[in-house]
Image (cartoon, rainbow, N blue to C red):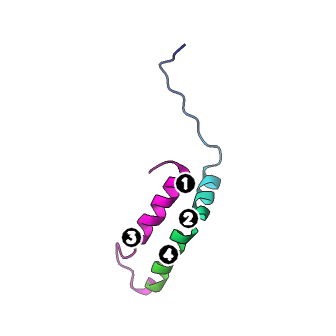
Amino acid sequence: MSTSVATKVFDKHPIRKLATAAGACSAAGAAYGKCISDSYQDVQKGMCAAEFKAFKECVQKVMGRKW
């Protein structure tokens, strides 16, 4: 039996899942944090883009989704 309406299952605890994923990416998160803290008095757009991208990709990989 097939239905024309797709069912989507939503995670009831997305923040918990995000926190777990961020914890699993602690090395990339620490590198991003260090980059920000090293030059927090002279913030410029894109100054830690490579570090943020690595952290974001790690979190997305652990969570199994992209945004």
Q: Amino acid at mark 1?
A: Val
| Cα separation between marks 4 and 3 | 10 Å
| Cα separation between marks 1 and 4 | 18 Å
Q: Which residue is mark 1?
A: 62
Q: At numbered mark 4, what does the secondary structure look like: helix, strand or loop?
A: helix
Q: Is residue 58 above or below residue 46?
A: above
Mark earlier in primary sequence (3, 1): 3
Q: Are marks 1 and 2 in contact (CB under 8 Å)?
A: yes
Label 4, residues with CA under 10 Å away: few <14, some 14-19, many ≥20: some
Q: Which residue is mark 2?
A: 25
Mark earlier in primary sequence (3, 2): 2
| Cα separation between marks 3 and 1 | 19 Å
Q: Are marks 3 and 2 in contact (CB under 8 Å)?
A: no
Q: Amino acid at mark 3?
A: Ala
Label ID, residue 5: none
Q: At numbered mark 3, what does the secondary structure look like: helix, strand or loop?
A: helix
| Cα separation between marks 2 and 4 | 10 Å
Where's residue 7, x and y in %? 54, 28
Where's residue 3, x and y in %? 51, 17
Q: Is residue 30 above or below residue 12?
A: below
Q: Is residue 24 above or below residue 10?
A: below
Figure quadrant of residue 43:
bottom left
Q: Which residue is mark 3?
A: 50
Point 54% across, 33% down: residue:
8
Mark earlier in primary sequence (1, 4): 4
Which span is picked out in magenta?
Answer: 40-67
Label ID, residue 31: 4
| Cα separation between marks 1 and 2 | 8 Å
